């Protein structure tokens, strides 16, 4: 396990280095001048040039990258050109908000996918199976922006059950925080549930045909006990991989949902950084999200060994 972990950590470092190069290069391809976005077009050229020099934007891209990555390795992602705040401080405030939404969406997805996938597999080719697969297909196919708007129309404007937009810190008002979390979490979680339901169904179907299942049934174990104790644990291994990938996608791809529900996470932060040409914030946000996604994939791989004793890494 230790040699494997060392290899994966080395690969993780290489991936992040390559990602930092790509992020830095692509960010500087965004049209527009961040200095003009800060000062406006009416300010004289000498003032703009002075600010450009102070921010280091007049240096070659290679020199700018070397300076940025050197600071990033020391935990310094720079300073926002829009708010003059440290990027690390901004991310420390915004990232937990997005992580909370991501975990809530993953919880919604699992709460729907596990029972739906198991029931669909046990009742294979029945109306229940067809209905579950139809709902799963709809969950994957429906765009999140449309679903979010429909949920707001129904639960906020029509039935007035839940707030439409906004964020409330859990420490300040737990009940209010949960009420504001429901709609964005369901919007993201339904799409995740669709993907996971199909994986759970496929995994359970495969395990139900194994010899150990027939042996357990021959010993007199009830069908529910066989599924709960034996089938589900083995069937969740491929589902775990999909869950890790989807959580990574949710972490970095909740931009539209955060915009719809005015959720002040890293997605909304990235959009604001693009609009204001705030290079340090955009670079730091993408790099941190990419690092978290890579770490999540590593944790998923390590979880395999804990869930299945047959899996060993050398």
Image (cartoon, helix red, strand yellow):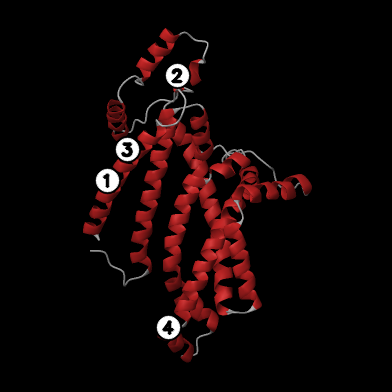
Q: Residue at x 34, y 30 (%)?
A: 76
Q: Which residue is mark 4?
A: 210
Can you give x and y, in whole percent of width and height, for residue 164 in the image?
69, 42
Would you identify the image quadrant in which residue 137 lies?
A: bottom right
Whole-number angstrom distance, CA of label 2 to CA of label 1: 32 Å
Mark 1 and mark 3 lie on one chain; the one further toward the N terminus is 1
- Using the numbered discs, state the Cα–Cα distance from disc 1 to disc 3 in whole angstroms: 11 Å
Alpha carbon separation for disc pair 2 and 3? 22 Å
Q: Secondary structure at mark 3?
A: helix
Provide the residue designation for mark 3.
Answer: 21
On the image, numbered disc 1 is attached to which residue?
Answer: 14
Instruction: Answer with mark 2 or mark 3, whichever residue precedes in sequence.
Output: 3
**Structural crowding at the residue carrying mark 1, measured as other residues with C-alpha within 10 Å and reported as few (<14), some (14–19) or many (≥20):** few
Query: In the image, is residue 182 above or below residue 226?
Result: above
Q: Residue 35, labelled with which disc? A: 2
> Which numbered disc flags the more N-terminal residue, 4 or 2?
2
């Amino acid at each position: 396990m230790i040699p494997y972990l060392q290899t994966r950590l080395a690969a993780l470092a290489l991936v992040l280095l390559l990602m930092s190069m790509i992020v830095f290069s692509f960010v500087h391809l965004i049209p527009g001048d961040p200095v003009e976005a800060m000062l406006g077009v009416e300010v004289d050229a000498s003032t703009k040039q002075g600010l450009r020099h102070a921010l280091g934007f007049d240096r070659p891209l290679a020199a700018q990258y070397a300076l940025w990555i050197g600071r990033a390795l020391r935990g310094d992602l720079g300073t926002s050109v829009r708010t003059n705040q440290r990027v690390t401080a901004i991310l420390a405030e915004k990232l937990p908000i997005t992580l909370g939404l991501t975990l809530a969406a993953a919880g919604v997805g699992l709460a729907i996918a596990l029972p739906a996938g198991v029931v669909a597999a046990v009742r294979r080719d029945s109306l229940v199976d067809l209905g579950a697969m139809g709902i799963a297909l709809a969950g994957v196919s429906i765009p999140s922006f449309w679903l979010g708007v429909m949920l707001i129309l129904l639960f906020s404007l029509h039935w007035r059950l839940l707030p439409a937009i906004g964020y409330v810190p859990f420490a300040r008002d737990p009940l209010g925080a949960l009420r504001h979390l429901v709609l964005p979490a369901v919007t993201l979680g339904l799409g995740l549930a669709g993907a996971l339901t199909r994986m759970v169904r496929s995994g359970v179907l495969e395990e139900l045909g194994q010899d150990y299942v027939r042996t357990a049934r021959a010993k007199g174990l009830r069908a529910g006990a066989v599924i709960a104790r034996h089938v589900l644990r083995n069937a969740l291994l491929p589902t775990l991989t999909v869950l890790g990938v989807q959580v990574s996608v949710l972490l970095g791809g909740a931009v539209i949902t955060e915009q719809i529900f005015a959720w002040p996470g890293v997605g909304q932060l990235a959009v604001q950084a693009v609009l204001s040409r705030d290079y340090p914030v955009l670079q730091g946000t993408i790099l941190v999200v990419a690092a978290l996604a890579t770490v999540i994939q590593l944790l998923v791989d390590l979880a395999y060994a804990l869930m299945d004793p047959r899996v060993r890494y050398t």
